[in-house]
Amino acid sequence: MEIAKLSTAVSHAEVKQQASLAVMNSALGQLETQGAGMQELLDSSKVNEAPHPTKGASIDLKG
């Protein structure tokens, strides 16, 4: 009877491990997709123009 319990326990552990790996693979795929989208967004936001010479040179303080 001990062998049957051990076999069941090992089987359950294998199923848990397979489910965990499936969830991790799914999350990894989503992160890769989001990363590619973020890289595309950053690449599209690059501007080839020179920055305005006075923009950001001073700060107005209200007191």
Image: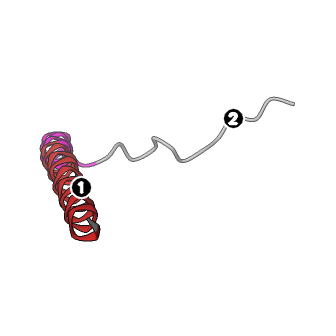
Three-letter amino acid code at the position of disc 1:
His
Circle 1 SS class: helix
Comparing 4 with 49, the one in front is 4
Q: What residue does disc 1 label? A: 12
Which quadrant of the figure contains the C terminus? Answer: top right
* Residue 13 picture location, percent across and down: 25, 61
Residue beneath the point at 39% across and 47% down: 53
Q: Quadrant of residue 47?
A: top left
14 or 52: nearer the viewer: 14
Which residue is drawn at the image coordinates 65% and 41% (left, top)? Answer: 59
Q: Position of residue 49 (x, y in %)?
A: 19, 45
- Tell me if residue 49 is in the magenta stretch: yes
Residue at 18 percent across and 39 percent down: it is 41
What is the CA distance from the residue labelled 1 to the residue labelled 2? 66 Å
Q: Is residue 50 left or right of residue 29?
A: right
Q: Which mark is residue 41?
A: none
Tell me the quadrant of the picture where the N terminus can be found. Answer: bottom left
